[in-house]
Amino acid sequence: MKKVLRKTLGLIRLPRMYDLPLLFYCVVLSLIGVVFIGSATITSDETVVHDVMSSVIKQLIFLGISLFMMMIVSNIYSDKLAKKLLIPIVLGVFGLLMLCLLMPSQYNAKGWIILPLPGPTVSIQPSEFAKAAMVLLIAYTMCNRPKTATFWDLVKVPAFVCIVYVLVIWRLQNDFGSAAVIFMVTFLTMMIPYHRNLKKGHRILFGAMVFVLLLLLYLMSPAGEGLLSKIPMEEYQKWRFRNVSNPFGDFYETGYQVGNSLIAFSRGGLTGVGLGKSVQKFGYLPKAYNDFIFAVVAEEGGFLVAGIVLLLFAGVIKRLLQYAFRAQRQEHKVILFGTCAYLFVHILLNIGGASAFIPLTGVPLLMLSQGGTSLMTWYMMLGVSEHIIATIRRGEEEGVVYSE
């Protein structure tokens, strides 16, 4: 028993020569999130101190568990273990996604598994695991393949799994936001592996990306109304596109959320109205502690605090990209780029939606929004990244070359 305990305690640390600034930025962002989650919980005059403290303590517990899991992952992770567990992970995530369909709906979606635990309701959202699983799947199925591998040989497995995940989450769970994140993360990550038979495919994918971006811009403009009306989406989803060009055009109906989010940004000014003094969170911003947490940060902390948050996010992305460019193993390069894409897509969709730059998607802002599954998944991917970064810094990748 003592030997097992000693071995377990030995894993509660980070690998030698890990990247301290990267971890520091993430922990600071998470602690800022805890503070503003507590503030955003105050949504009415009847909110009591117990409710606020409960949300803060709950998020701190999630953070503690996430940091614990990150240290465990950073110590036990290896390419060999990842390849061995890849199929069980992919199938396990699919099983959890299907299990969600047996659960009661929340927020008009079936994306959560309710855990039968005493006390406050605790749930997990398997779609978060799917995002991380896709990064690992691409890294270990598309990299270092034989020269004779065709384009189809290289992309068929991740493409098939991505399509399955997206269809289950979008059509069966009715969670368009999570499905969009998985698709975008997969798309960006698949652009990274190098193989001579991927060159043409990458050009096609890049062209498709440009086409989709132009199409989205067109749909968000008044000129795209005719095409938008013919797309098979829910009516409220179509209105999210319309509200981008004119957020206040239907303020009291379809534009209510994004309109009040913009008001929160404008009220914050340079220094903010003060912690806990947001007006918009009092019923004007639904799920202010999640989808609109950045609007609360901007209103209460102003441009200064919002700017610090953005700089911290930029710091995380910079550190990941820095080591991704230094990585010698294809798998490591893809995982670091994929982890960066995972964070960037969440930032783009959450802050872009809250600021009416793009349609609202209901995607959380990693490390700031309330929630345990997204936080734990991020820190597990951070653990994988820290393991890879430590390997790079120790020079243990020397002599590794890419396959053609």
Image (spheres, rainbow, N blue to C red):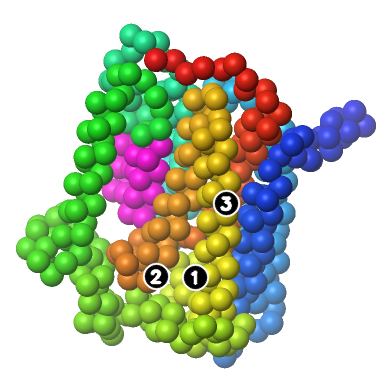
Question: Within the image, what quadrant is residue 322 found in?
Answer: top right
Q: Is residue 121 left or right of residue 291?
A: right
- Tell me where residue 234 sits by quadrant: bottom left
Q: Nearer the viewer, residue 355 or 89?
A: 355
Say which label, 2 or 1, has the lower sequence index: 1
The residue positioned 21% from the left and 82% from the top of the image is: 249
> Which residue is under mark 2?
354
Q: Quadrant of the N terminus?
A: top right
Query: Marks 3/1: CA distance?
Result: 17 Å
Crowd class of label 3 (few under 14; some 14 to 19; many from 20; radius 10 Å): many
> In the image, which residues are magenta?
161-189
Decide: is 297 above or below 182: below
Hey, what amino acid is under mark 3?
A: Val
Q: Which residue is mark 3?
A: 316
Q: Residue at x 55, y 25 (%)?
A: 328
The residue under label 2 is which amino acid type? Ala
The answer to whether the residue labelled 2 contacts the one labelled 1, judged by CB atoms less than 8 Å apart, is: yes
- Residue 106, image x and y in percent? 43, 61
Instruction: Judge by depth and name the residue closer to the eye, 103 or 122.
Output: 122
Q: Secondary structure at mark 3?
A: helix
Can you give x and y, in whole percent of width and height, for residue 254 in the image?
A: 26, 76
Residue at left 35%, top 45%? Answer: 184
The residue type indicated by label 1 comes to Phe
